Image: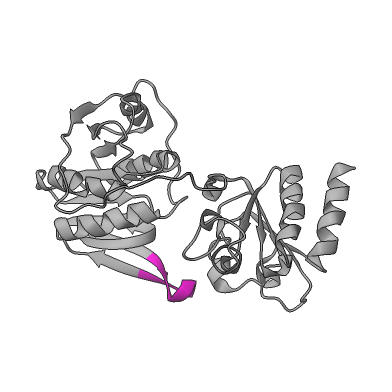
Amino acid sequence: MSKLSNIWVFSDIASRLPEMIAAGAALGEKVSAFIIGAESEITAAYTLGATHVYYLGEKDSQKITEDYSHTIAQVIAANSENSLVLLAPTKRGKALAGKLGVQLQAGVVNDVTEINVENGVYAKHMAYGGLAIAEEKINSQVAIITLSSGVYEALPVDPSRTGEAINVAFVEPTTSITCIERRVKQGESVDLGKAKRVIGVGSGIGSQENLQVANELAALMGAELGCSRPIAETEKWMERERYIGVSGVMLKPEIYLALGISGQIQHMVGALGSQTILAVNKDKNAPIFQYADYGIVGDINKVMPALISALKA
């Protein structure tokens, strides 16, 4: 398998960095990681497989991720060889990808599920709401990709790995967003892509009060709670980070339990990576049963208490 001369990686979420570096190691001869944070994170990046670390300094509460685009672009532009930039598929990561695309005159592909670097850079991603897979060839000298979670497995941590660290001075953006105030977001931070067990709730949950029952079931199962798009974006009963689907989280758990979810393809593309899918829906003709390994036709508001009682027994 041919490899590119250099892969650049950056993640605004620390938990995603290991798999980004692993992707870089699989696709490139050299893996250069941009790090914002404590200096101890430089050594941590080496142990994960980075060969070079470009240190952008401590985190600054007055800066957002996109403010670093000029700094990152300047470093990449100074290295003339063909290269690939891998970013996490977060809101901030995609915003950074867009800015870098303009500054480096580079092609950008988001939410990529497969990369091939034989005779160029080819990126596969879902299209038409998950009904098809599109493959794009990025012809620019620098290619920029936001990589979906779970595409690459993180490399084992190896304390013997070392590399080269380069301190990078911050380049002020031409125009920037001024931070007036920061408020703590309500709700807990969660990375469903890393969960081994996930319960997904859909419109069949009926009410916010019933979410408490689903939370109790999730606690007993040792599972994280996710949801379909209407629960997060229409009802706003759960955080956007818990939405499972084509433009949300892509799951790869051991067990996925879908409660009151019809099973439209836009949701299922985010759940098909599950080893085992369990479904509960009162509609026997719901599409979810075409994907489920095990299914129960019934009212989730009766099934959930029964499952809780069984798990407590």
Q: Is residue 128 magenta?
A: yes
Tell me the residue at 70%/42% (across/down): 222
Which residue corresponds to the image point at 51% horizontal and 54% vertical from the top-left? 241
Q: Image quadrant of residue 78?
A: top left
Residue range highlighted in magenta: 125-134
Image quadrant where one finds the C terminus: top right
Q: Is residue 184 left or right of residue 3?
A: right
Report the residue at 16% width, 61% height from top.
Answer: 140
**Which residue of the protein is positioned furthest toward the bottom in this rendering?**
285
The question of residue 190 being in magenta is answered with: no
Name the side, left or right, on which 226 lies relative to 153. Answer: right
Question: Residue placed at 53% from the left, 71% from the top?
Answer: 266
Q: Residue furthest right?
A: 313
Viewer can see residue 234: yes
The percent coordinates of residue 211 (x first, y second) are 71, 57
Q: Main secondary structure of the magenta part?
A: strand
Q: Is residue 278 above or below residue 29?
A: below
Q: Between residues 182 and 82, which one lies in front from this camera angle? A: 182
Q: Position of residue 93 (x, y in %)?
A: 34, 52
